[in-house]
Image: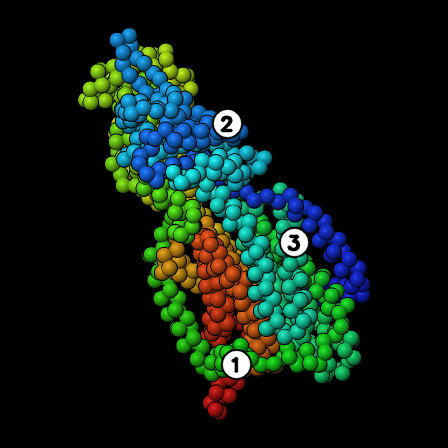
Amino acid sequence: MATLSRGLRRYTERIIKSPRMVIIAILAVTALLISRAGSLQIDLDPDLWAPQTHPYIQATNELEKVFGGRNVTLIGVVPRHGDIYQPAVLSKIQRMQQAIQELPQAVRHNVLSLGARKVKSINGTSDGMEVRQMMERIPETPEEIAQLKAAVASLPIYVGTLVSRDGQAAAIVADFKMDKARPSYSAIVDQIRPIVDRERDPQVDIYLGGLPVMISWFEFYLMKMPIFFGLALLAVTAIQWWSFRSIQGMLLPTLTAILSVIWAIGLMGMLGTHMDPMNTTTPILIMAVAAGHAIQILKRYYEEYHRLRTTTFLAPKKASRAAVVESLTRVGPVMVLAGLIASITFYSLAVTGIPMVRHFGVFAGSGVLSALILEFTLIPALRVVLPAPSPKETARERQKGILDRLLLWIARSLTGGRAPWIIAAAVAVVVLVAAGLPLVHVDNSNKGYFKPTSEFRVHDDILNARFAGTSTIQFLIETPTQDGLKDPKVLQAIASLQAFLESQPQVGGTQSLVDLIKRMNQAMNGDRQEAYTLPTRRDLIAQYLFLYSLSGDPQDFDSLVDNDYRKAAVWAYLKTDSSAYADALFKKAQSVIARNFPGNVTVRMGGSLPQTMALNEVVTRDKFRNMAQMVAIVFVLSALALRSFAGGLFVATPLVAVILANFGLMGWLGIPLDIGAATAAAMAIGIGADYELYLLFRFREELARSGSLVIATRDSLLTSGKAVLFVALSIIGGYSVLQFSEMAWYNRISTLVMATMAVSALSGLFFLRALMMVFKPRFIFGKQRERLFAALAEVGSSK
């Protein structure tokens, strides 16, 4: 570290010789990065959430390629009076369905309603089978309406999906392809809304649900993030004012924070990385961390300036320039170390299996690195150009307040023999909070990220009450040969799977080719109720399908079976999007699949909900691996920097306590282990290491200067300890504004970040310091530790 200090001294002396050139260079780089920031896009493509190598995702991709169904949207039409079998209501349904079907991103064969061409009635005749469009024209007379009702009732595949079971609501089910050039669900929903709005009137209520609608609301709330960033900036700025009580002390960290965010966003634009839900809060993190590091530098600058003015009597301008050099020389090495550890820790997330987490790691790591560069260039350059602090300003900065009294109490407790009690109390608190660990449940529910009173949740609840469900699972059935799906054994196995699924709570209904073949058999057997079953002969099944093709359209089955009858899709509609529930459902379904399907038939699961299940599974697996990896990185780098194995343990041990507290808090608050929780835990490790390092290095410095444990403990806490509190308060203040978001996703992240930052800072101030006093590590106290603690004992006994 001595070599690094000498290098930083020479570096800083060069910076202050040409401060204006440095400022111009910083402005030029900033302008370049601002020009790249314009290419950023809000991107909520599910591929960002989903690990592409997972079997569920691979099945989903195959299902989408053959059948579609990845982006199902449900539009519910509920008459305010009477049922849906009214000419005016049916006309609205048909017009909306036809208009949506013509949208450029619509999967046309998956846009269904009672008025869709491929929704057919199936009837037996003396000449064979008659297949006709269910609603060729809008029924006007009571007889025509009665015929339509009978046709709908004869096809259970459409009851619960296109028409509610009580006939009081109807639905348009649509499917869309994502535009990869502009991956935005808002672009899809923005095309749907005018079509729907044209049909709104006092006769009907219309509700929107499904994955595209949900994610478009995500995008809506994401677009509000600049407002919250502005509020966070105000909160952080207020904390800077409290910290320094001066305009310069307030503005310099704030300017550094803003530029750090601009640099990181510009870098994202240069790399072609889009903005996603996890990254939308990262600017607040970068801003708070940058401001926090700037606090460390400026706090030390004011210390050195005061010392130089009172001991060397230098003129204000010369004292200011000397203080810039001294502050960076003394705090710079630990800042470099802490910044690099935080950056590397965040960058380590780039190896995770989830693209969104990788993007967060790169963005956060780049932001911390940007802040580090700016703090070693812009702050010293500006500090030299700006006027030296006035006596009034320095006096205000040194005023004692509530934090000083708290830190002095901690110092007296640590040196007064209470360190073992502090450790015991800290362990008791951690154990109490960690007792919530068994309550942590792994789950991802995208709907749960919205408040119950939000428009999306209100609409979704109504649609789930009326219809089979707004969440979908698809089972991909694959046979080894052409026409393999005409085998009665395979079809009977599909029927068994459907029967099992429909017997489960939260499953509102299923659809497959089997439903249509059952209706064909019933129609060809005089519409007898008991004939609604599968034929047992392969040739009869083939004959039914042939007869259907004579009057039906080739595209009628596109969402259920491929042209070769080799692959089929079974659709299941769920009233919940809980990944934990869906995972349990699939595990139970596997025994049904193994018992009924022939050995040469494979059954895979995919669809919108299994994408969340895949994320859930990978988060569970990667979460603990990533945290262990991050703690290991912190341990190794800290041990190398401190040249001590014990030093690495002293930095890493409080982080483990923070992680336990983080998970325990999740359990007590009922917050599920999901991707948002992963953000907070990563931050606790990446930023928490900074606190430990600043405190350890400053204590060693003060101990070398004073030779007294009492003085070193007091002075290090009043300087670096106070700065650590302000850093934590900056992050807490920045994230606290997210409590006012209308989206529960941000509320949860805010709660976890604020809690873990508070625990992390207090752990460093109390737990780490108490461990030092109890275990007396040689890497801190050196060969004089016995003398130092003997002197401390003498001071204690004299009292």
In primary-sequence order, the first of circles 2 and 1 is 2
Residue 265 is at least partly visible in this image: yes
Any mark on residue 405, and which? 1
Residue at x-position 57% and y-position 77%: 718
Label 3: how many residues lie within 10 Å, few (<14), some (14-19) or many (20+)? many
Rendered view: 580 above or below 288: above
* Residue appearing at x 63%, y 73% in the figure: 244
Q: Which residue extends farthest bottom?
A: 798
Residue 398 placement (x, y as % from top left): 63, 79
The secondary element bearing badge 1 is classed as helix
Point 35% across, 17% down: residue: 132
The residue to which callout 3 is attached is 262
The residue carrying pointer 1 sits among few (fewer than 14), some (14 to 19) or many (20 or more) residues within 10 Å by Cα, namely: few
- Quarter of the view holding residue 527: top left
Q: CA distance from mark 2 to mark 1?
A: 70 Å
Are discs 1 and 3 less than 8 Å apart at CB? no
Three-letter amino acid code at the position of disc 1: Arg
